[in-house]
Each structure stands twice: as structure tokens, then as C-alpha cells.
Image (tube, rainbow, N blue to C red):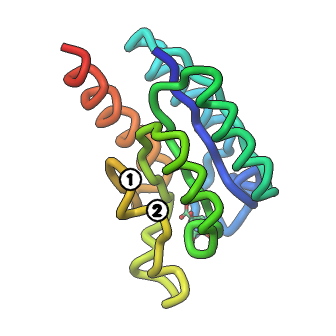
């Protein structure tokens, strides 16, 4: 079983980026903890972060070639703008969870629209780094239920 953790623009700055909104954990800490949780469930994890839309699209295409079973995705600001990333996820037909550290729905109005929520298996937001860990827990349960 293989999972992909995909993070969009500016999330490489976690730890120092607006900590009052996004918390103090670095992306590396989040990736390591996610890896540990999935490892316990016998699932392999690849992590990828990019500030470039086309690199995220290419990684989603690659995930199909690599037979990735599930994508954990924080599209960051692309949440609110990217039809291209939405189309890529639909094209590869890999189930995914949309993740946010903050709760975009309780922030500026331009963050209220998501191009992903209606096609995601689940949306987990507003829990800081725990959004990732909760998403992992639920995704593992979903995938295991599907395979029994
Ligand atoms: C975010 C929320 C987005 O609105 C924002 O552009 C981000 C991070 C979050 O994790 O809370 O970069 O996806």
C-alpha cells in the first residue's frame, strides 16, 4: 500500500510562516510524523512539496504510474484557484483527502471557495498539524475497510 503526501505553495515555510495561523511545526516534522503513523499501518509514504502548480500536477500524474493508493493533499493557496489540479486528480482517479492547517471557511472570503472539497473523500481542516494526523487516521481506516 502506497500513500503520497502532497503539499502546495509556501508550506515549505511552516514553522516560521504566520505561526499564529499555521502553528509552529515544520513541514519536515509533519512529514516525519505522518510517515511514522503510516509506517505503523504498514503503508509506504512519499512526501512532495512544491511552490509550482505544474510540478504538483506532474506529481499527481506520476502517482498513477507509481500505483499510489491514496493522496493526502494540502493544496494551500491553489485550493482556491486551481482547476488544473482539480482536473489532474479527477484524471488519475486516486482517492484523496483535502487537508488544511487553518479553517479557510472562517477566514477571508476568497478562501471560502475550494476546487477540491466536492471531489475529496474527506476534508480535514482547522486542527493545525493535527489535521494531517487526523486525515491519516481516517484514510487508513477507509482504505482498510475497502480492502476487507
Ligand atoms: C492552507 C489554507 C490556504 O487558504 C492558504 O492559502 C495556505 C494554507 C492551510 O493549510 O490552512 O497556504 O491550505
Residue 54, picture quadrant:
bottom right
Quadrant in which residue 126 is drawn: bottom left
Crowd tier of the residue under label 1, counting other residues whose Cα lies within 10 Å: few below 14, some 14–19, many 20 or above: many
In this picture, residue 32 sits left or right of residue 49: left
What is the spatial separation of the Cα atoms under label 1 and label 2, in whole angstroms? 6 Å
Q: Is mark 2 within 8 Å of ligand 1?
A: no
For this view, does 22 lie left or right of residue 104? right
Please state which of residues 123 and 116 is positioned toward the viewer in this rendering.
116
Of the pair 4 and 115, the residue shown nearer to us: 115
- Image: 11 above or below 102: above
Secondary structure beneath dot 2 equals loop
Q: Position of residue 83 (x, y in %)?
A: 60, 68
Q: Which residue is mark 1?
A: 120
Residue located at (54% from left, 47% from top): 91
Contact? badges 1 and 2 (CB < 8 Å): yes
Residue 116, label in figure: 2
Q: For the point 31% across and 26% down, which residue is it?
A: 143
Residue ID at (23%, 24%): 146
Q: In terms of depth relative to the viewer, which is nearer, 31 or 85?
A: 85
Ligand 1 placement by image quarter: bottom right
Vertical side of 78 occupied by 45: above or below: above
For this view, does 117 lie left or right of residue 88? left
Helix, strand or loop at label 1? It is loop
Q: Residues within 10 Å of mark 2 (few under 14, many from 20)?
A: many
**Rendered image: mark on residue 145:** none
Q: In which quadrant is the C terminus drawn?
A: top left
Quadrant of the rendering where the N terminus is positioned: top left
Give how far across and how far down residue 128 sits, in percent. Answer: 47, 55
Amino acid at each position: 500500500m502506497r500513500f503520497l503526501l502532497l503539499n502546495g505553495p509556501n508550506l515549505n515555510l511552516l514553522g516560521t510562516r504566520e505561526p499564529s495561523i499555521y502553528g509552529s511545526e515544520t513541514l519536515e516534522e509533519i512529514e516525519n510524523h505522518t510517515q511514522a503513523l503510516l509506517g505503523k499501518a504498514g503503508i509506504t509514504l512519499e512526501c512532495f512539496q512544491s511552490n509550482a502548480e505544474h510540478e504538483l500536477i506532474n506529481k499527481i500524474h506520476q502517482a498513477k504510474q507509481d500505483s499510489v493508493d491514496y493522496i493526502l493533499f494540502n493544496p494551500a493557496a491553489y485550493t482556491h484557484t486551481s482547476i488544473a489540479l482539480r482536473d489532474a486528480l479527477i484524471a488519475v482517479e486516486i482517492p484523496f483527502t483535502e487537508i488544511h492547517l487553518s479553517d479557510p471557511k472562517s477566514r477571508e472570503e476568497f478562501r471560502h471557495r475550494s476546487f477540491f472539497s466536492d471531489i475529496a473523500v474527506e476534508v480535514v481542516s482547522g486542527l493545525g498539524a493535527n489535521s494531517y494526523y487526523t486525515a491519516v487516521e481516517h484514510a487508513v481506516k477507509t482504505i482498510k475497510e475497502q480492502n476487507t
